[in-house]
Image (spheres, rainbow, N blue to C red):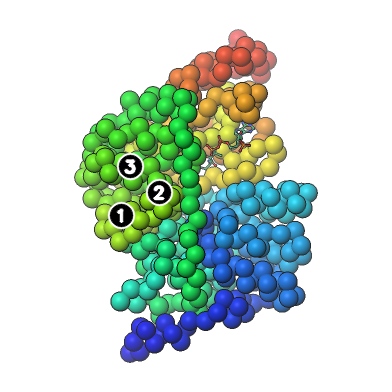
Amino acid sequence: MQDIYSIYHQKLTTPEEAVAKIPRKCNVSFGLGPSNPPALLASLAERVDAGDVDKIDLYYQIAKDGAKPLFKAKYLDHLRFHANFMTDLDRELIQEAGTSSVIDFMPCYLWQLPRVLLEFINIDVFMITVSPMDKHGYFSLGTSCDYASTLVRQCKTTIVEVNENMPRVFGENLIHVSEVDSIVENHTPLLELEERPLSAKDVSIGAKITEMVPDGACLQFGIGGIPNAVAKSLTNHKDLGIHTEMLTTSVVDLHEAGAITNHKKNIHRFKSVFALCWGTRKLYDFIDDNPSVESYPCSHINDPSVIQRNDNVVSVNSIIEIDLMGQVNSEYIAGHEFSGVGGQRDFMSGAFRSKGGMSFLAFYSTAKNDQVSKIVPRLTGIVTDSRMEPMWVVTEYGMTNLKGKTNSERALALIELAAPQFRQDLLNQAKKIGLIR
Ligand code: COA
């Protein structure tokens, strides 16, 4: 058998030559956030500039700095953008093009995404940043196992961008040099997600949830400021476990405080497990070669039937708005997609099935400098979570458990959680739409 170093050197090429293998018309996907492969995506943009692309459909989540060269209105005749979780880059393209239709969003629960990409969309080419090859011939997908570990092995062509700043992570995160088609090297700093400083509202919401979390709970934190604040307030807890879609920097503080042992988990005991990771360099250094951390595909981590196998699952996510019946929108603002569903519903559903499990939707009662109430009479946009899904709902004004509450009880409880200046109007609206007498 050929030795791994000669296979590596045979496959090592330039970004230009690597992307030259992408068919002129095909489906392409790439690693998300810190795993966006910048050299490869920049070279793909050059191919479009050179008139060497007919129609490429891009399927992706969290396109950030590494994907920037592609996100230009001038490419819209040749590139079609299908986000499943949007960021500022998608929103900037919408602004440049003047229409939200340029991002043709693909709705999908995260736990279903690997199968959907592979079997129903048929991704032809997958590109991702990986850590350097180890002495056994394995690259690590590092921050991104999510849909990456499925596509990297099973789509027609896989191109990896080796970056020595990408951490080496255990779990189903390793891919052998024999399994990739082309290798390029580019050692740029990884994309980081800075933590926003905690506000008084964060502390107040964090404290309410912290009181409810038992020692030994198994935690999931969603994306956004509030889930992060809750994580920060749990440092005095004991024997916590981590089974989360997204691993963030706050989890490092919990590990360092000795709050996380993963001893009480029923699956993945003694390990913190995640599907994707996005935070500061401190987080990337923490997960690097750390045998207490493992990553798995979102088809496993986010599958409610897997989540439920741990006891006392606590899931904390944030939202854009909730209506008086308890329907939730976590992804739509002003008539178009703002982010995506991510694993919010996967974890709410898994937490309910877990023995002793609880889900929290935590958010400030207002947005836009207190001009807008996040508690509204009726959702105007799409529904991320049906009214049957939410359990605990938390704002800076209090918390309520919607499970078992009737329509009128829900309306009255949610009005109590709204900012005082909106309560009377909400009460009037609740009467008008027949929720209360
Ligand atoms: N009406 C109008 N604007 C609103 C709004 C509302 N009801 N709610 C929020 N916004 C605006 C904010 O003002 C802010 O605008 P700005 O950037 O101009 O200041 C922006 O939307 C983001 O709001 P913020 O509350 O700061 O967002 P966040 O970073 O805390 O994230 C979600 C909150 C809901 C967007 C985010 O948690 C999400 O996308 N969730 C869905 C997916 C998910 O939960 N996945 C779980 C596993 S990762």
Which x, y percent locates residue 110? 49, 51
Count of marks placed on residues: 3
Query: Quadrant of residue 284 in the image?
Result: bottom left
Q: Is residue 201 left or right of residue 99?
A: left
Residue at the spot 28% in from the left edge and 58% down from the top edge: 290
Which x, y percent locates residue 430? 62, 16
| Callouts 1 and 2 close, C-beta under 8 Å | yes
Closer-to-camera residue (92/332) = 92
Which residue is denoted by mark 2 in the rendering?
247
As drawn, 100 above or below 377 = below
As drawn, 303 above or below 186 = above
Residue at the spot 75% in from the left edge and 75% down from the top edge: 51
Q: Of the residues shown, which amino acid type is indicated by label 3?
A: Asp
Q: Which quarter is ligand 1 in?
A: top right
User: Which is closer to the viewer, label 3 or label 2?
Assistant: 3
Q: Of the residues shown, which amino acid type is indicated by label 2?
A: Leu
Q: Is residue 269 left or right of residue 306?
A: left
- Under tag 3, what secondary structure? helix
First-in-chain label (1 vs 2): 2
Give the alpha-carbon distance from disc 1 to disc 2, as whole Å. 10 Å
Query: Quadrant of residue 43 in the image?
Result: bottom right
